[in-house]
Amino acid sequence: MKRILIIVIITLVSCSDKVNEEKLMSLNIDKLYLSDQEDRKNNEINNWSIVSKRDEFRRKRVGQLIDSNKIISAKDYAKAAMIFQHGVDSSDYLKAVEFMKTAMKIDSTVNKSLFAAATDRYLLSIGKPQVYGTQYIQEGNGTWELKNYDTTAISDEEKKRFGVGSLNEQMEKLKELNKGN
């Protein structure tokens, strides 16, 4: 009886994953983006393994939308970039950078801060220093740091052009983040 119950539970879990995947695979870029943001709304997400699966499905779906020419506007490319920004490796982060380049090429007024964040995340993932200073990392002891940051690579003016604070503003933000520690 226990074996049958275990088999039924495993089957139900497998089916529910399949249903969730099919549901996500039918979404357009707006709904994929909203779903991505909703998964991150609550700072105390209990199960990152579930979110990671949804992220994977969203990236797969974005790939399908791009392949079928259903992502064409700057806003669409920026939404695709955000989804890939939440990827798992340098190839995902590089796609986020490329999608933001395309978005900025289509519309020069698009919010460029995601380009800076994706660039930094990509650089860190390949073992190079971040250049915009967007990736604050929380250490095991709870303190926040701007690790592996080449503070001379990008001027404060350029950072501001990409929606990123100056070096002084970043240091103030770091102090604020660490105030409670």
Image (cartoon, rainbow, N blue to C red):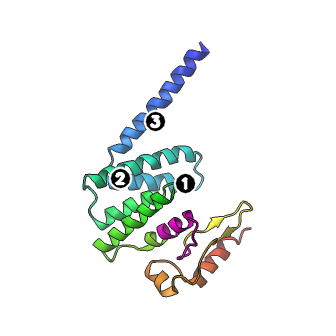
Task: Give the image quarter of residue 30.
Answer: bottom left
The residue most toward the front is: 127
Element carrying mark 2:
helix
Taking the magenta stretch, the answer to whether it contains residue 11 is no
- Label 1 belongs to which residue? 42
Q: Amino acid at mark 1?
A: Asn
Taking the magenta stretch, the answer to whether it contains residue 127 is yes
Lower position in the chain sequence, tag 2 or tag 3: 3
Residue 164 is situated, as x and y percent measured from the top left of the image, at: 50, 77
Q: Amino acid at mark 2?
A: Val
Lower position in the chain sequence, tag 2 or tag 1: 1
- For label 3, count other residues whose C-alpha is less than 10 Å away and answer few (under 14), some (14-19) or many (20+): some
Magenta span of residues: 117-133
Lower position in the chain sequence, tag 1 or tag 3: 3
- Label 3 belongs to which residue? 17
Specify the label residue 121 is tagged with. Answer: none
| Towards the viewer: 141 or 122 | 122
Q: Disc 2 vs disc 1: which is toward the camera?
A: 2
Q: Are marks 2 and 1 in contact (CB under 8 Å)?
A: no
Element carrying mark 3:
helix
Q: Residue at x 49, y 44 (%)?
A: 53
Q: Is residue 132 above or below residue 74?
A: below
**Separation of marks 2 and 1 at Cα, in angstroms:** 24 Å
Q: Quadrant of the N terminus?
A: top right
- Label 2 belongs to which residue? 62
